[in-house]
Image: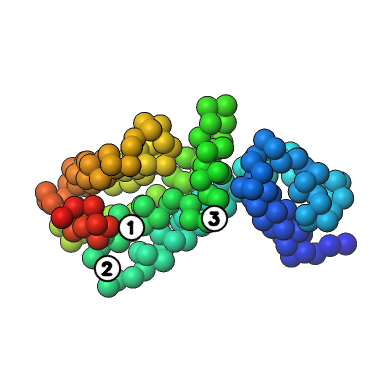
Amino acid sequence: MKTVKEGEVRRREILVAARELFVKKGYEQTSVNDILKIVDIAKGTFYYYFTSKEEVLEAIILDIVEEGARRAEKILEDKSIPLVNRIMMAIMAQAPEFEGSDEIKEELHKVENAKLEQLYLRAMLKRMTPVLKGPFIEGIDRDIFHMEYPTECIESILLLGHMMFDCDVFEWKMEEYPRKIQAFLYNAERMLGAKEGELKEFIRMFGQVS
């Protein structure tokens, strides 16, 4: 009988192979048989871990959420970075960073895959809200932030950032992004109850304003 650890390794192998194929060939063009060939397993073994190709993609999306949360946690641990900058960097760290991530995001944001988009949003909010709660409370305690609903503020900023910059809903041109980023940060200041210009130094770090 396989140990739990061996099962976890096998499941991880399937996810790694599937992610690579989804990026190279596209989700629709990738079959379960394609995944089987790379991992070198029988079809029955695949279906022991996953009921469908869609379930594999769902697991990859949850992995993306977890990777983003771990990047955020690492950023928030660095006390040499000012608190406000740490928070905004942690929020922006949710964007996937692996090669081919744009292809996965494109699949995620397709209209016909609304269920996957909802899965990502639910998982991201559930994972990231507790990660950011401590720094937000610290900001309130230090009189940097002034807000009545910190949890809901976190959720609102995460959702706004995702809709503006990850979904490509608006199909903005590249030259429009500096203004959109400035507007996002300005509105984030209002939600945080921070003083005007609190996030200006943060946007300078990314070379968006002179």
Tell whether 141 sits left or right of 89: left
Direction from residue 156 to residue 110 in the image, left or right: right
- Residue at point 21% right, 57% down? 204
- Find disc 3 in the rendering and name its residue: 99
Task: Identify the residue at image location x=86%, y=46%.
Answer: 44
- Which amino acid does the dot numbered 2 rest on? Ile
**Disc nearer the start of the sequence (3/2):** 2
Residue 162 on image: x %, y %: 39, 41
Closest to the observer: 24 or 108? 24
Q: Quadrant of the N terminus?
A: bottom right
Q: CA distance from mark 3 to mark 2?
A: 27 Å
Gap in Å between the C-alphas at discs 1 and 2? 10 Å
Give the residue type that dot 1 points to. Answer: Met
> Is residue 121 visible in this depiction of the protein?
yes
Q: Which residue is mark 2?
A: 81
Identify the mark nearer the N-term, 1 or 3.
Answer: 1
Q: Which mark is residue 89?
A: 1
Contact (Cβ within 8 Å) of mark 1 with mark 2: yes
